[in-house]
Amino acid sequence: MAGMNETTSRDLDRLRERAHGPVHLPETDGYDGERLGFQRLAPHRPAVIVGAAGAEDVRAAVEYAAARGRRVAVQATGHGLGHALRDGVLIGTRRMSEVRVDPEARTAFVAAGATWRDVIEAAAPYGLAPLSGSSPGVGAVSYTLGGGVGLVARRHGFAADHVRRFDLVTADGRLRTVTADSEPDLFWALRGGGRGLGVVTGMEVELLPIARLFGGGVYFDLARVPDALKGWRRWTETVPEELTSGLTALCYPDLPMVPEELRGRHVAHVQVAYLGTETEGRELVEPLRALGPRLRETLRDLPYTESGAIFAEPDRPHGYRSQNRLLRGFDPAALTSLPRSAGPAAPMMCVVGLRHLGGALARPPEIANAVGHREAAYLLNVLSLVEPGEEGKARALHEEVLAPFAADALGRSLNFSYGPLEEDELRSAFAPETYRRLAGLRAAWDPDGVFQV
């Protein structure tokens, strides 16, 4: 036992010598700060954490884990934490936040730990923008690996469709440049296939000539406008691809930090992002505004740097779980059930999120990738704030809320899966042949299962 402890100690000393960033054990200062991300329910509890400062630190961590039969997980911001790592090696990438913009080529190199806010701010001086999502605090790389349904997705498709290159550390510790020419199978899989093939240390993405958009929110009291959800669905059938929208329904608590007009109400918050002029945008949303009296409205012309204000999502870490379904369409009766099953009478707080898909999302990219269920017309997500021990209660409620939509369900979205996924749930995110191909690539590139999927 003494010899084993000495070997372990020497191995850790060598890892510390190689790494430029910190190496933490459970008993060292900084361990909790490094392992905790945005998602605080059941966080990682690794045996070793490497706070990577660059690609060489990632290589060192992967080689250390592989040599000892330990699994590896990666965390940038921790928004989409799934299965928590136990007794393995966690690579924290938040120090790797570099963004380099090439305004002539309209591209950006985005390091592993950069958030979309980092990319937005770096691109804005050139009148450019990335295909970022509703929350600018989300890690850009992990979002893109899951496909990436962004604010202007109906016009420009998935974020994964616009990647030109990945820098990837594979299970053998090698740093590889992955492009359509150099590693076509890996390039296909990384764009939308999720994790499990290595650690992406950076990616090169296309930027779009977007400086401003028309957007914001329209808020309805569901007690006064009970048909708001059905009205939004009808409205989405009339809008052009330049308009991408969503709807969030939730019961706001009657607390001082909540805007007065929303306190204690069951609210439908419609989010709008339109690539066009304010005049055109206001004409397009007029049928939406006509659904009934509005509690609040924040529609305006805004710079893309303020695009996070459209969804106005919370930015404080908390614990949560969710379930989602990609849908062909909506059964009107099923849509009517949502305010009842996930409203004030629900046994725990539910946040129902709807996204309008279609448009460019439904078209194949120039270079094929692994994104699943492009034919989906809508996405339905149900999320609850969850305390330890309430996971089962939340899952049962979410399954009840989603059950009326089973006939129109195609599968799951990786980007909106906030919690552990079983094998059959992960499989449902892809067509059968896509899943088989992904599984074959993971087996070929990571035969010993170093990377936690």
Image (cartoon, rainbow, N blue to C red):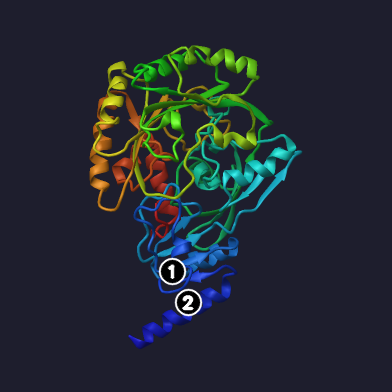
> Which residue in the protein does label 1 denote?
48
The residue at the point 30 percent across, 46 percent down is 422
* Image quadrant assignment for residue 324: top left
* Image quadrant assignment for residue 330: top left
Looking at the figure, which quarter contains the N terminus?
Answer: bottom left
> Which residue in the protein does label 2 denote?
12
Determine the residue located farthest toward the bottom in the rendered image: 2
- On residue 63, the disc is none
- Give the percent coordinates (x, y) of residue 176: 58, 55
The vertical placement of 167 against 296, above or below, is: below
What SS does tag 2 mark? helix
* Image quadrant assignment for residue 216: top right
- Give the percent coordinates (x, y) of residue 197: 46, 52
The residue at the point 53 percent across, 37 percent down is 133
Of the image marks 1 and 2, the number of the one nearer the N terminus: 2
Image-based side of 201 in relation to 335, left or right: right
Image-based side of 349 in relation to 72, left or right: left
**In the foreground, 258 or 442:** 258
- Give the percent coordinates (x, y) of residue 195: 45, 49
The residue at the point 44 percent across, 70 percent down is 67
Q: As shown in the figure, which amino acid type bears the numbered disc 1?
A: Val
